[in-house]
Image (cartoon, rainbow, N blue to C red):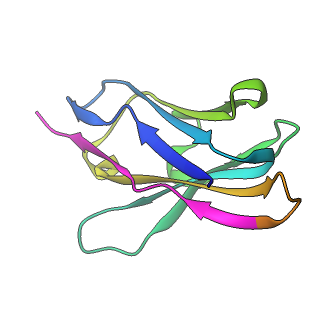
Amino acid sequence: QVQLVESGGGLVQPGGSLRLSCAGSGSIFRINGMNWYRQAPGKERELVATITSGGSANYVDSVKGRFTISRDNDKNTMYLQMNSLKSEDTAVYYCNAFIENVAHYVRNYWGKGTLVTVSS
C-alpha cells in the first residue's frame, strides 16, 4: 500500500517561513512527477508548484521568488520551503504524486493535507 503524508504546517506570522514535507511510503518502486496544491477557504484547489524526477521545478506566479520546491529521491520525500508568507497563502496544502509501485503500476496519489495559517 502506497501513501503520501504531509507535515510541517502550522500558524505563522506574515513575513515568516515554514517548510512543508511530503513523505511517500509503502510499496514504492519510483516516484515520478510531484506537486504541491493548496485550497484556501471558499476557493478551488490550485496547483502551487511542480517538480520532475530530475528536479526541474515550476511555480504559480503568486509564489515565484518566495517558495522553493525540492525533493530527495532516496527518501521518497518532497519539500516546500515557504518564505515571506502572506495572509493569502493561508490554505490546506496537499501533496500529489505519480507513483510507480513494485508491480510497475503507475497511479496518482494524494496526501490528506496540512493546514498553513498566516496571521498576526
Residue drawn 84% across and 65% down?
105
- 90 is higher (above) or lower (below) than 43: above
Residue drawn 82% across and 36% down?
55
**Predominant SS of the magenta segment:** strand
The quadrant in which the N terminus is found is bottom right
Residue 38 is drawn in which quadrant?
Answer: bottom left
- 14 is higher (above) or lower (below) than 92: above
Residue 68 is drawn in which quadrant?
Answer: top right
> In the picture provided, is 2 more to the left or to the right than 95?
right
| Residue 54 in the image, given as x and y percentages of width and height | 88, 38
| Residue 39 in the image, given as x and y percentages of width and height | 37, 63
- Tell me if residue 118 is in the magenta stretch: yes
Magenta residues span 107-120
The quadrant in which the C terminus is found is top left
Residue drawn 79% across and 54% down?
101
| Residue 61 in the image, given as x and y percentages of width and height | 58, 53
In the image as oriented, which residue stretches furthest toward the left? 120
- Depth check: give the residue in front, 108 or 33: 108
Q: How many marks?
A: 0
> In the picture provided, is 5 more to the left or to the right than 41?
right
| Residue 104 in the image, given as x and y percentages of width and height | 89, 59
- Tell me if residue 1 is in the magenta stretch: no
- 42 is higher (above) or lower (below) than 28: below
- Depth check: give the residue in front, 92 or 86: 92
- Depth check: give the residue in front, 112 or 105: 105
- Depth check: give the residue in front, 120 or 30: 30
